[in-house]
Image (tube, rainbow, N blue to C red):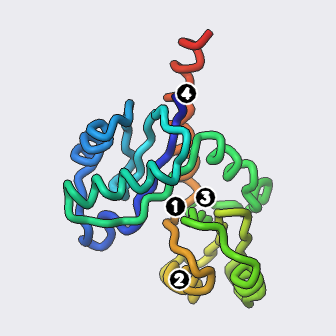
Amino acid sequence: MSVVISMLRGVNVGGHNKLKMDALRALYASLGLQDAQTYIQSGNVVFTTSAKHLGPLAGRIRKGIGRSFGLRPDVVLRSASEMRGVLARNPMAGRRDFDGSKLLVTFLVDEPGPEARARILGLETDPEELWLKGQELYVHYPDGVGRSRLSPAFIERTLKTSGTGRNWNTVVKLLEIAAGLEGPRKQAAR
């Protein structure tokens, strides 16, 4: 069994695509996903699964949400190991001015191609800073996302792939939940 973090795009944002987290946990259980735990109301679910391939699993979850709730959000999955890599690659680690609420990690559905990578990395972004590392885009918004021209929609158009953003504090919490699920499993395997 492995631990997986699921992030839904556009759920419970601005009163749209409303989805209750208890109903979402029940749906995950109905799909054979175990130990489902949600974090805040934005569609974050941490669970265990025996599935080996995350791509087909994301499709199963998306179809289940569509059947049960009439919504079709992007479902972005990362293993606990991949999420540890996201934390390890924090480009702002060690900075004195680091504020986790101002660093947004966008988890991309697909890795951007070379042209899209060059386009996003070639942007003049001051006062924001951005880093693209694999399927994650890290953006530091010192004045907040709402005032920035680097909006999620602009980023998706530039990268030609969709994704879902989580602030650094949420990323850390999701990994903490995942580690909690891994702990009992690792001890049981001994």
Does the image show residue 102?
Answer: no
| Residue 120 occupies quadrant | bottom right
What's the residue type where badge 1 is placed?
A: Arg
Q: What distance separates the C-alpha of mark 4 from that of mark 3? A: 24 Å
Q: Position of residue 138 (x, y in %)?
A: 66, 67
Q: How many residues crowd around disc 1 within 10 Å: few (fewer than 14), some, or many (20 or more)? A: many
- Identify the disc placed on residue 166: 1
Q: Secondary structure at mark 2?
A: loop
Report the number of discs. 4
Q: Are marks 4 and 3 in contact (CB under 8 Å)?
A: no
Contact (Cβ within 8 Å) of mark 4 with mark 2: no
Is label 1 in a helix, a strand or a loop?
strand
Q: Which residue corresponds to mark 4?
A: 182
Alpha carbon distance from label 3 to label 1: 10 Å
The answer to whether the residue labelled 1 contacts the one labelled 2, judged by CB atoms less than 8 Å apart, is no
Q: What's the CA distance linking mark 1 and mark 2?
A: 13 Å
Q: Residue at x 77, y 83 (%)?
A: 118
Q: In the rendered image, which residue does mark 3 sit on?
A: 100
Which residue is under mark 2?
A: 151
**Mark 3 or 1: the one toward you:** 1
In the image, is 87 to the left or to the right of 46? right
| Sequence-first disc among 3 and 1 | 3
Q: Position of residue 190 (x, y in %)?
A: 62, 9
Q: Nearer the viewer, residue 176 or 26?
A: 26
> Which of pointers 1 and 4 indicates the residue nearer the eye?
4
Give percent across and percent down for residue 97: 72, 63
The answer for how far apart the CA atoms under marks 2 and 3 are is 18 Å
User: Do tag 1 and tag 4 residues touch (Cβ < 8 Å)?
Assistant: no
Q: Earlier in the sequence, mark 4 or mark 2?
A: 2
Ranked by sequence position, the earlier of labels 1 and 4 is 1
